[in-house]
C-alpha cells in the first residue's frame, strides 16, 4: 500500500462517528502545564490569561481536525499587547525583543538589511516590538520606518507559521498606529489589553520579587507596603509592577543601611533576609505621617 492509497484509505474510513481522544492529545501538548505556570508566575491579569486559554483551545481543536482530514483555519498568532507601563512582561522561550532603533536605518538602503537580520534571528520564535508606534513617523518625509513596516507585513503574511510578531505599546498610541497602518491591523488576530493591577495584586508581586532574591517581608512590613502601594498609585508616573520593583530596591537599600548602622551586634540570617516596616516607612510618601 503506497502513501496515496493509505491516505485514501484513512479518508474513506472517517465518518461522523469516528472517535478521537481529546484527552490524550491535550496531554501531549502540555497545555495545562503552561496554563498552570501562568497562574503561578503571573499575578492577576485574568483577561490576558483567558485570551491565552482561548488561543490554546483553538490550536488544539485545529490539530484534532487535521487528524480527521478536516480543513484548518490556520489561525494567525500575531498579537497586539496594550496597557499601562509595568503591566506585562515576557522573559522565556525563543524571544527577541526590539525597538525602532533595531529595525529602522538612518539612511537609504540601511533599513532593509537591519529589519531582515532581526527577522532572521527571530525566526522560529517570537519577535516582540516594544513601543511599535515609533516605527511610523508620518510627519517626517525622510523617515524609513514605513520601509521596515512593509518588510514586516510581508513576513507576517508569508511566514506566519514560522514567526509570531507581537506589537506592544500604550493603548491610545497603538490605536492611532493601527489607524495609520491598516495593513498591520488586518494581520493582528489577537488584541490583548493588559489591565492595571489592583493594590493587593501589586503586593503579591512585591512579595514574589523579594522571594526571588531570598528576602522576606515581616507581617507589619506587608501592611506598610500595601499602604505604600495605595498611595503610590495616586502619584504621577505610576508604572504598576515597575514602580513596585523600584520601591523594593529602595527598601533593600534602606535595610542594608539599617544593618550597616548596627555593626556593634552579631547578625543572624534572619536579619539579612528580613525587610522591616521601617525600611518602607522611610519613603517620602510617608513623610506626612
Image (cartoon, rainbow, N blue to C red):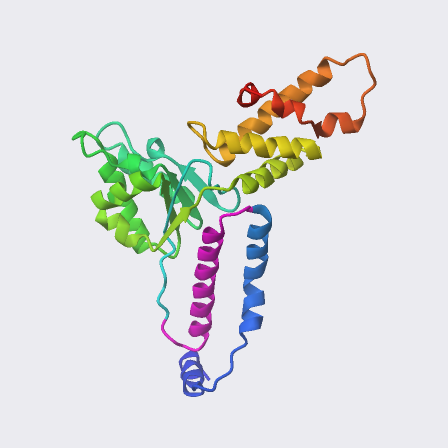
- The C terminus: image quadrant: top right
286 or 42: nearer the viewer: 286
Q: Is residue 114 one of those drawn in magenta? A: no
Q: Residue furthest front?
A: 289
Highlighted range, magenta: 42-71
Can residue 215 be spotted in the picture? no
Q: Which picture quadrant has residue 162?
A: bottom left
Does residue 145 show up? yes
Give the camera-side residue of 126 and 87. Answer: 87
Against 266, residue 92 (above or below) is below
Query: Does the magenta stretch mainly form a helix, a strand or a loop?
Result: helix
Residue located at (43% from left, 60% from top): 55
Please indicate whether residue 182 sits to the left or right of residue 273 in the image: left
Which of the 4 image quadrants contains residue 223? top right
Instruction: Say which residue appears at 50% left-offset and 29% top-offset.
Output: 232
Q: Is residue 227 above or below residue 262?
A: below
Image quarter of residue 214? top right
Residue 51 colored in magenta in the image: yes
Residue 216 position within the rendered picture, expressed as x and y whole percent measured from the top left: 69, 34
- Spot occupied by residue 263 in the image (x, y as percentages of width and height): 77, 13
Give the left or right position of residue 234, taking residue 210 as reference: left
Amino acid at each position: 500500500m503506497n502513501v496515496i492509497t493509505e491516505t485514501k484509505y484513512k479518508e474513506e474510513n472517517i465518518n461522523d462517528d469516528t472517535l478521537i481522544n481529546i484527552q490524550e492529545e491535550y496531554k501531549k501538548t502540555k497545555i495545562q502545564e503552561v496554563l498552570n505556570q501562568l497562574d503561578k508566575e503571573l499575578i492577576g491579569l485574568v483577561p490576558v490569561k483567558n485570551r491565552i486559554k482561548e488561543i490554546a483551545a483553538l490550536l488544539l481543536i485545529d490539530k484534532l481536525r487535521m487528524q480527521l482530514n478536516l480543513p484548518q483555519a490556520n489561525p494567525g498568532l500575531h498579537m497586539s499587547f496594550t496597557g499601562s507601563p509595568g503591566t506585562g512582561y515576557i522573559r522565556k522561550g525563543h524571544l527577541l525583543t526590539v525597538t525602532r532603533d533595531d529595525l529602522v536605518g538612518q539612511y537609504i538602503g540601511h533599513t532593509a538589511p537591519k529589519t531582515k537580520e532581526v527577522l532572521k534571528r527571530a525566526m522560529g520564535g517570537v519577535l516582540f516590538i516594544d513601543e511599535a508606534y515609533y516605527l511610523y513617523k508620518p510627519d517626517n518625509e525622510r523617515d524609513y520606518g514605513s520601509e521596515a513596516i512593509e518588510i514586516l507585513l510581508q513576513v507576517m503574511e508569508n511566514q506566519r507559521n514560522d514567526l509570531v510578531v507581537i506589537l506592544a505599546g500604550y493603548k491610545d498610541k497603538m490605536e492611532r498606529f493601527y489607524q495609520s497602518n491598516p495593513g498591520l491591523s488586518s494581520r493582528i488576530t489577537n488584541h490583548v489589553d493588559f489591565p492595571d493591577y489592583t493594590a493587593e495584586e501589586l503586593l503579591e508581586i512585591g512579595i514574589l520579587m523579594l522571594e526571588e532574591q531570598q528576602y522576606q517581608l515581616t507581617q507589619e512590613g506587608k501592611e506598610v507596603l500595601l499602604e505604600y502601594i495605595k498611595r503610590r498609585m495616586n502619584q504621577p508616573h505610576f508604572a504598576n509592577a515597575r514602580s513596585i520593583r523600584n520601591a523594593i530596591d529602595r527598601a533593600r537599600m534602606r535595610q542594608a543601611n539599617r544593618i550597616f548602622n548596627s555593626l556593634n551586634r552579631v547578625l543572624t540570617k534572619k536579619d539579612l533576609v528580613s525587610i522591616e516596616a521601617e525600611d518602607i516607612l522611610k519613603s517620602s510618601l510617608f513623610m506626612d505621617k
